Image (cartoon, helix red, strand yellow):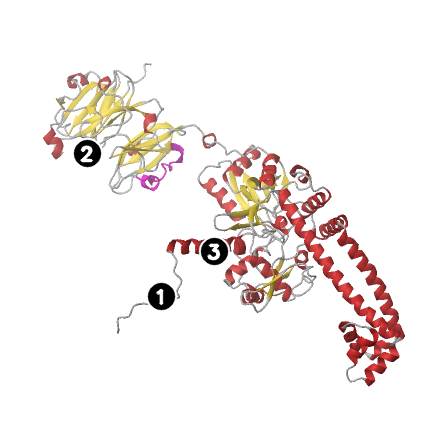
């Protein structure tokens, strides 16, 4: 192959930066203007407009029969909207769902989804559809010269650029959309209220938002419920075009049970049921016996919540559920719209209605002008017909004798081309005397109509009056009562979890395998419990149900879990690893409970330790909190409670020596490695030939219990004197047969009788 230089002559060159910038801007403008945001005039996105227009072209008016939805979708994507059929059908389904649209535009037959699962609709080959009566508000004036048309994507057909909506559909049905760099969230509103506000604004163009809010109280959601936001919050988003509001379910008390009769907008009943059931399972709602969804054809929404007794405060329960489930929801408001100038912007309520009324007045003006042009054209034709009837014999003679009668007629009677053509097209049967009477009557009516149309077009006041009259007529025809109550209420507050739990003594037991459980009372003997094969008792803590159980692992990390949330001691417990995330290879060394200011001794088997307040050990992190820095290859010993400042610390090593010293010699620290408690030579420490096997704290006149396997030995306060020394010494040798100690625990002296 010859080496030829590539020739780029005539090829446009562009820097990659400018090309990508332009390409992305073009894409973003397409998404904003032609996909995601609604137009102010008809409140529709392009795909919705094309679906409605295609259905009208298919003859799917409200009075006609339903047709397969696939037929409509095929027409839409084949003629006007070359995109995915699934997305197109979903847009069509949304317009048919009475729980999604305040005033549905599509009348569906078959499975069109449910409030529980809006996406559960059947495929388009199974469902049938036509337009609703409300769709006439959007389409009724389409053939009357009211809007501009544009070629479709391949130029073979024309489609309307906008529909001549007779009502502000944008506010009535609302919409949601995410474009590039902007989004829109417009809630639905009540038709009668919006119509009244429009009429008010026509009569008083300077009306304030507050004046309009005397008519529009707030959004009107299709599923009912209550809007509980303060009026100031609603006024804020009507003035600025951006804000939020809260809506909640409606309930009533029936036979001592709570019955929810309406959910907030876009909330699934099955999800709410699951949220409540989950709280019941987690013992966060002990006052609730059961929750049942009894919704059916007669009761579209009926969720029954059954209390355990008639002493339960149902209002408090509902406030808790409002705060913790979807029975109360917040909604964003962002009135971001493509205005009449074709540019997207955020509008307040007043600007939005003023803009739409401008669109409506323009539309009505075009309709009237279109009708006036037709009337004038017909009057012109009737004028020619009257001339023909008054000179009938001569007209017939010219038609019979002339080869080209049309120019002769035009010259003889001074007719226009259209008039002569109409005369020549007149049938013989219409030459009767009666027809002349009909023409005179029609001419009289059309002249009166033309005069009326001209008078309306010439007067802004008459035009506004006509627009107001038509809005009022549509409001009476399509309007209905408000579904959503607006009741200003206090924000819902969840019940404090601790108030639901009885304060009672509990014992938390930890096994060597990391399994945990809790039993009521302090009398339980943890060694008498059953353990899984290969598992055994490790540590026990006694405290109150409302306290935190704090677990210490072998790496020196602490973890906290509410004691009442732990599984019952009736079983073998549950692994802590299911609720916590300890480091790989870590094992749990002990569990402690108590008051925040309690002092505990933490030590590693390398011979170091310190005392720490219990409050420093509490954490809500699943991965825990590093408290004791443990030397490499060393492990944490079970923690010991420090009952008083004059207690003794007892440490035992693997060579059978025990040292006792004052607890005041051990430093108090929030975290760290600690100080040396027992003198282990560095060589033995490095090879782990010598380690600490047990640590305990004994109060004055208390006793020390040592365990060696299943055997236990008790030493009195007096017997501990021979092991006394200074911190970091080697201690004294334990009696023969008790030199392999694996656990030690200090006990307070019995109370005096």
Q: CA distance from mark 1 to mark 2?
A: 73 Å
Q: Which residue is disc 3 drawn over?
A: 26
Residue placed furthest toward the top: 753
Q: Crowding near pointer 2: few (<14 within 10 Å), some, many (20+)?
A: many
Q: Is residue 573 magenta?
A: yes
- Residue occupying image coordinates x 53% and y 41%: 330
Identify the secondary structure beneath mark 3. helix
Circle nearer the N terminus (1, 2): 1
Q: Earlier in the sequence, mark 1 or mark 3?
A: 1
Q: Secondary structure at mark 1?
A: loop
Around disc 1, counting alpha carbons within 10 Å, would you say few (fewer than 14), some (14 to 19), or many (20 or more)?
Answer: few
Q: Looking at this view, is 81 or 1 the one in front?
A: 1
State the image coordinates of residue 719 (x, y, percent, origin top left). 18, 18
Report the magenta residues as a range.
563-581
Q: Quadrant of residue 56?
A: bottom right
- Quick one: 299 or 235, which is closer to the camera? 235
Say whether disc 2 or disc 3 marks the residue closer to the N-terminus. 3
| x and y, in percent, of residue 541 in the image | 32, 29
Membership of 239 in magenta stretch? no
Is residue 497 visible to us here? yes
- C-alpha span from label 1 to label 3: 26 Å
Q: Is residue 459 left or right of residue 527?
A: right
437 is higher (above) or lower (below) than 555: below
The mark found on residue 8 in the picture is: 1
Relative image position of residue 396 (x, y in whole percent): 85, 81
**Label 2 with label 3: CB-CB less than 8 Å:** no
Task: Judge depth for marks 1 and 3 and give the one in front.
Answer: 1
SS under mark 2: loop
**Quadrant of the drawing holding the N terminus:** bottom left
Disc 1 vs disc 2: which is toward the camera?
1
Mark 2, residue position: 634
């Amino acid at each position: 192959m010859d080496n030829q230089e590539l020739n780029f002559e005539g090829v446009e060159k562009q820097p990659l930066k400018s090309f990508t910038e332009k390409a992305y801007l073009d894409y973003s403008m397409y998404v904003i203007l032609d996909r995601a945001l609604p137009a102010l005039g008809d409140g529709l996105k392009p795909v919705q407009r094309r679906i409605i227009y295609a259905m009208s072209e298919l003859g799917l008016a409200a009075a006609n029969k339903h047709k397969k939805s696939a037929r409509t979708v095929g027409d839409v994507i084949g003629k006007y909207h070359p995109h995915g059929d699934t997305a197109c059908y979903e847009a069509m389904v949304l317009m048919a769902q009475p729980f999604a649209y305040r005033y549905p535009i599509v009348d569906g037959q078959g499975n069109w989804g449910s409030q529980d699962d809006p996406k559960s609709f059947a495929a388009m080959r199974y469902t049938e559809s036509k337009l609703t009566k409300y769709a006439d508000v959007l389409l009724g004036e389409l053939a009357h010269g009211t809007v501009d048309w544009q070629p479709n994507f391949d130029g073979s057909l024309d489609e309307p650029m906008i529909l001549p909506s007779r009502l502000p559909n944008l506010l009535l049905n609302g919409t949601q959309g995410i474009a590039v760099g902007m989004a829109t969230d417009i809630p639905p509103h009540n038709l009668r209220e919006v119509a009244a506000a429009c009429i008010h604004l026509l009569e008083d163009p300077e009306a304030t938002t507050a004046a309009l809010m005397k008519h529009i109280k707030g959004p009107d959601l299709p599923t009912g419920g209550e809007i509980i936001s303060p009026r100031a919050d609603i006024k804020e988003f009507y003035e600025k075009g951006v804000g939020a509001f809260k809506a909640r379910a409606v309930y009533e008390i029936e036979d001592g049970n709570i019955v929810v009769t309406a959910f907030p907008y876009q909330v699934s009943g099955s999800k709410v049921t699951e949220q409540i059931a989950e709280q019941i399972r987690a013992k966060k709602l002990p006052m609730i016996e059961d929750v049942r969804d009894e919704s059916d054809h007669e009761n579209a929404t009926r969720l029954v919540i059954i209390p355990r007794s008639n002493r339960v405060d149902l209002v408090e329960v509902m406030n808790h559920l409002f705060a913790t489930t979807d029975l109360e929801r917040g909604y964003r408001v962002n009135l971001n719209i493509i205005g009449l100038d074709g540019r997207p912007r955020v509008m307040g309520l007043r600007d939005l209605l003023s803009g739409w009324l401008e669109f409506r007045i323009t539309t009505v003006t075009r309709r009237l002008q279109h009708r006036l042009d037709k009337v004038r054209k017909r009057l012109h034709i009737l004028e020619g017909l009257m001339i023909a009837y008054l000179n009938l014999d001569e007209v017939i003679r010219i038609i019979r004798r002339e080869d080209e009668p049309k120019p002769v007629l035009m010259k003889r009677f001074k007719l226009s081309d259209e008039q002569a053509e109409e005369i020549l097209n007149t049938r013989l049967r219409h030459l009767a005397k009666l027809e002349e009477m009909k023409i005179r009557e029609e001419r009289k009516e059309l002249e009166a109509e033309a005069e009326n149309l001209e008078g309306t077009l010439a007067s802004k006041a008459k035009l506004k009056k006509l627009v107001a009259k038509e809005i009022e007529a549509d409001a009476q025809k399509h309007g209905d009562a408000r579904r959503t109550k607006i009741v200003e209420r206090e924000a819902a507050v969840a019940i404090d979890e601790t108030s639901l739990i009885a304060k009672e003594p509990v014992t938390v037991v930890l096994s060597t395998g990391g399994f945990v459980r809790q039993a009521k009372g302090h009398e339980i003997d943890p060694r008498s419990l059953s353990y899984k094969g290969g598992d055994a008792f490790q540590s026990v803590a006694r405290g109150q149900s409302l306290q935190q159980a704090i677990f210490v692992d072998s790496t020196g990390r602490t973890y906290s879990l509410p004691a009442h949330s732990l599984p019952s001691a009736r079983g073998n417990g549950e692994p802590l690893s299911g609720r916590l995330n300890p480091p790989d290879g870590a094992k749990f060394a002990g569990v402690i409970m108590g008051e925040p200011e309690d002092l505990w001794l933490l030590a590693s088997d390398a011979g170091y330790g310190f005392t720490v307040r219990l409050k420093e050990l509490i954490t809500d992190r699943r991965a825990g909190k590093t408290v004791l820095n443990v030397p490499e290859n060393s492990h944490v010993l079970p923690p010991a409670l420090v009952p008083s400042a004059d207690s003794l610390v007892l440490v035992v090593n693997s060579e059978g020596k025990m040292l006792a010293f004052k607890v005041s010699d051990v430093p108090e620290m929030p975290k760290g490695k600690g100080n040396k408690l027992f003198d282990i030579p560095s060589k033995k420490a490095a090879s782990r030939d010598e380690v600490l096997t047990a640590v305990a704290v004994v109060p004055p006149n208390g006793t020390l219990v040592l365990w060696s396997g299943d055997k236990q030995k008790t030493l009195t306060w007096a017997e501990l004197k021979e092991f006394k020394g200074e911190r970091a010494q080697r201690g004294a040798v334990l009696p023969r047969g008790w030199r392999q100690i694996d656990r030690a625990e200090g006990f307070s002296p019995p109370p005096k009788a």
